[in-house]
Image (spheres, rainbow, N blue to C red):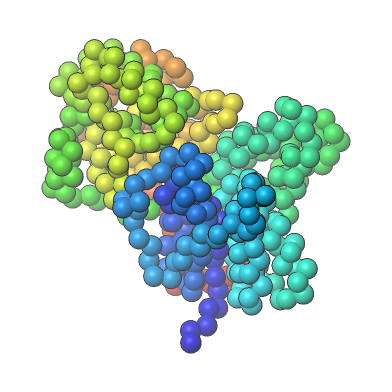
Amino acid sequence: MVTTENRLVIVVRADPVICGHSVEARNIAETALERGFDEVRIVTWPVETLERAGLPLKPLDSVLPHSPGIFVDRPAPVGDYKVPDGRFLAGITGRLIELFTDGVPTVCLSLYLSPHTLAVSDAMRAAWSTGLPVNVTTIAEAVGSDVTNVVRTAVEEGRLGAAAHILSSYLSQDHCVAVSDYTRDLIITEAERVDAQYGTRFGEQCRRRITVSYPAIDADRYSNLDDRVIEDVLAARGLEPGNYVLFLSRLTEAKGVEDLIAGFEQSSAHEGRMLVIAGRGPQAPALMTLAAQSPLADSIVFLDDVGDAEKPYLMAGCAAFVLPSKPRPEFVETFGIALAEKMLAGGGPVITTLTGGIGEAIGDHALIVPVEDPRAIARALDRAILETTPDERSEWAGRAREYALQFDRRVVFDRLFQALPARVPASR
């Protein structure tokens, strides 16, 4: 019988959810095995629960398998119909308690403060109360939308309890990290607003304890792609390298796809090219209706079945990649994982806004347009595609890739885990 000597537990909305942080969890899990962890457990939600929640999901047959040693736990709900809310969270919390009290030295990473760090905090409290040995180091990663969507709302509505619950659970973890400087500043600002209203002391603790850990990306999957394979993958979609503009992300209002459609119409670069909108999300029907009414309707294609294996090739083959994100009360782009992935893949220039933490993801390696400005998007498309030479685009892509390598999963993992106790395995 093989004894597990060190374990990593990741609590997250995992695949098949379309979210950069579900991919980040996968990348951290794979790196943990390389770096000496015996076992990785991704504790997440049942697929049918994710489906009922209306979250944008990848086709199940497009989800890549995990390496041996990575196990995905989807605990069943606890209780019956008389407990309509909390049954599934009770299942996750209960499973964490089991993992925290079985004697295996464990590091637990939660992505999203609400509800995942809340579950870890409750599980740790219960684990200690059992009297069983607990050898767990906790890391809570705030991704940003958990603050804008929950803490900020609680502050604006004057609900101290909800804000205090999240902030105190976050600060109860051994290590508190945020996915960008923007996110760290956002948390501190909201914590100080709570302090100003209620006389609490969250702001100073957040300022002192939160560090930045950028999202982990599998650079190997995006770098050094074979040109012949790129052509084959694109041909299967009826595309050719350089003959399309690409958007690839969730289809929500905050992503600005309607501005991209209008900008594509107004550009000169649309001649002979397609606009490929890849992704799923609640705004998909409205965007399809908008595209059908466009004078360029025949040149706009929606892809709702792009899997992780195909994504790098679509990025590498595009003439330009556009993410015209815009801030919304419920969501602000706190980093921009898709942008960093695109820069690793190469291909045409990135066009985006400076919303939230996007500037940290792109550095000086993108064309910047104002929020909600289709005409600026049109000018940027023309510059990126028509006013630069192939050599200029290649040089630009090379600099962008060099910048984005700082987000490679091994670099991010090593920086994150170097602060942990010595019992965490050193790199092999």
Question: Is 247 displayed left or right of 201 in the figure?
Answer: left
Q: Is residue 381 above or below residue 305?
A: above
418 sits to left or right of 171 = left
Q: Position of residue 113 (x, y in %)?
A: 63, 47
User: Measuring 18% from the left and 32% from the top, which residue is drawn there?
Assistant: 242
Residue at the location (44% across, 66% down)? 70
Quadrant assignment, res 353: top left
Q: Residue reaching furthest right?
A: 199
Residue 401 pos. (x, y %): 34, 43
Residue at left offset 49%, top offset 67%: 40
Specify whether residue 420 is in view.
Answer: no
Q: Nearer the viewer, residue 412 or 2?
A: 2
107 versus 364 height, above or below: below
| Residue 116 visible in the current orientation | yes
- Left or right relative to 156: residue 315: left
Specify the quadrant that holds the C terminus: bottom left
Residue 385 x, y percent position in the rendering: 23, 24
